[in-house]
Amino acid sequence: MFRYWSALVLFLFFVLLAGRSLMLHRRGIKAVVFGETDKSDFLLIPIFLIFVYAVLACTFGLPVPEALAKPFWISRITRRIGLTLCMIALIGFAAALKSFGDSFRIGIDEKNPDRLVTSGMFAVSRNPIYVAFLLFFSGMFLQYPNWLLLGVLVLFALAIHRQILREEAFLKAHYGKDYEDYCKRVRRYL
């Protein structure tokens, strides 16, 4: 029964993401601008799809090469810690989406960048959504500690860091001193 919680929190993660995107779409705001400024954004998609498949494979016993799916260890404690991290990540993700308001975008929106958000979760981290993603991926790894999820976690962390650097360059160019002052007050991650 415990293992099905991983699938549930993964589903809830998608519900939050899709729900916010649809809500903004209904207001006439294009929230998904992923890949419009740089086609290499699409490198995140296969990593994310492999992550989703890996979690579902570990949860429901879908086919995965045994060498990749064999757990490094089996521990109820780390599984519970992992699930707790995923739930904390979901709460942080929801709070960051709320803080973002109508400024939420998936990708860099050069045409309609909206306002610089520095309050709410953004007063704690300049990238609370990415922190939530990394916490979520780490939590899933603790639930299913294997080569497949470790590899995906490392690739995702590298891809997210690259995306953050790209976004920071855009934000600095667009918001100038306001963004530079914000960077002095608030850390990139935590």
Image (spheres, grey):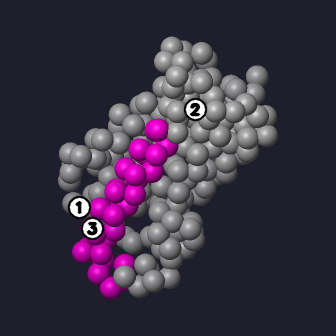
Residue type at mark 3 is Phe
Which quadrant of the rendered structure holds the C terminus?
bottom right
Asked if disc 3 and disc 1 are in contact, CB closer than 8 Å, the reply is: yes
Q: Say whether residue 53 is magenta.
A: no
Residue extending farthest right: 77
Q: Which of labels 3 and 1 is toward the front?
A: 3
Q: Residues within 10 Å of mark 1 (few under 14, many from 20)?
A: few
Which quadrant of the rendered structure holds the N terminus?
top right
Residue type at mark 1 is Glu
Residue type at mark 2 is Asn
**Mark 2 residue element:** loop
Q: What residue sits right under mark 2 in the picture?
A: 146
**Residue drawn at (40%, 52%) of the image:** 158
Question: Between residues 157 and 33, which one lies in front from this camera angle?
Answer: 157
Mark 2 to mark 1 CA distance (whole Å)? 39 Å
Q: Residues within 10 Å of mark 3 (few under 14, many from 20)?
A: some
Q: Which mark is residue 42?
A: none
Q: Is 174 on the left-hand or right-hand side of 96?
A: left
Q: Earlier in the sequence, mark 3 or mark 1?
A: 1
Q: What residue sits right under mark 1 in the picture?
A: 110
Q: Earlier in the sequence, mark 2 or mark 1?
A: 1
Q: Earlier in the sequence, mark 2 or mark 3?
A: 2
* Residue 30, position as x, y percentages in the image: 31, 49
Question: Between residues 125 and 66, which one lies in front from this camera angle?
Answer: 66
Q: What residue sits right under mark 3 in the picture?
A: 170
Q: Say whether residue 155 is magenta.
A: yes
Q: Identify the magenta region.
A: 151-179
Q: Main secondary structure of the magenta part?
A: helix
Q: Which of labels 2 and 1 is toward the front?
A: 2
Tell me, yes or no, if residue 19 can be seen here: no
**Mark 1 residue element:** loop
**Residue drawn at (21%, 51%) of the image:** 38
